[in-house]
Image (tube, rainbow, N blue to C red):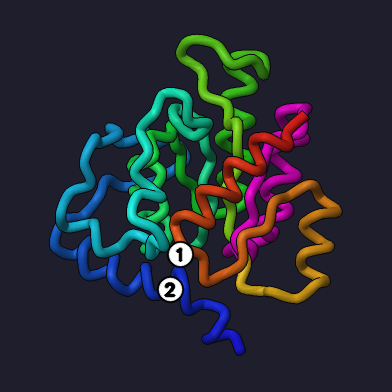
Amino acid sequence: MRASMRVGLCAVARAFSAAVQRRPLHRIGVQAQPAPRPREIPAGHREAMPAADSANDDTMESSDDLLYGCRVLLVDGEPAIRHALQVLLFRWHCDARVVANAAEALALVAQQHARHGGRHSEGSWTPELVLSGYRLPGNGSGIDAVQDVRRAMGRQVAAVLISGDTTPEQAQLAARHGLTLACKPVTSSVLRDKMVQALLRRP
């Protein structure tokens, strides 16, 4: 059962692991600066992208697109999946920061809050959307990570939870915490739609 829940993004992870060995990305950490957002995905990384289910679902570059320039905090404990999703976010021209767990997510947001008083201003970075896996290393789930970020920021930040649990109970849990649920295996177009839905639902 556990193996079947990991089919979607773990398949991405395996493909991306091989790509990373050939052409590694920059090291990720709470203090890391975001990598430049490429206009084109390097050939060595293209096979790592989640499967698309239409010809142009993940190639929009319109400045009217809600994801264009959107500040996204990506939280995932599996390095290969984390890197693959980061490349996808860059492809959508999101302004992404990437961390591995709930503690790092909170530390990044708290650091920005302390420096800039919780306001987004020139030189600061605060997330407009949190994209998190459900199972994270250490203490805390993806739901905990989102709740911690929201408390630190003092507002209801949009959030998408990626989970392999497709039970009604998981959907109810996500809804109860104001999260948009994306169930594995997830395609790039479905993930994109879920992120847009979450942004449209924010207060």
Q: CA distance from mark 2 to mark 1?
A: 9 Å
Q: Say which residue label 1 marks.
A: 78
Element type where label 2 sits in the image: helix
Say whether marks 2 and 1 touch (CB < 8 Å).
yes
**Mark drawn on residue 201:** none
58 on left or right of 20? right
- Towards the viewer: 196 or 114: 196
Residue 79 visible from this viewpoint: no
What residue sits right under mark 2 in the picture? 10
Mark 1 burial class by Cα count in 10 Å: few <14, some 14-19, many 20+: some
Classify mark 2: residues with Cα within 10 Å, few (<14), some (14-19) or many (20+). Answer: some
Say if 13 sits above or below 106 in the image: below
Q: Is residue 139 magenta?
A: yes
The residue at the point 69 percent across, 58 percent down is 140
Helix, strand or loop under label 1: loop
Image height check: is 36 above or below 21? above
> Which residue is rendered at x = 37% and y = 68% of the image?
12
> Is 20 above or below relative to 69?
below
Q: Position of residue 80 (x, y in %)?
A: 36, 63
| The C terminus lies in quadrant | top right
Image quadrant assignment for residue 29: top left
Q: Is residue 104 left or right of residue 147?
A: left
Residues rendered magenta in the picture:
134-162
- Residue 125: x and y in percent read 52, 24
Looking at this view, name the residue that lies furthest to the top. Answer: 122
As drawn, 22 above or below 153: below
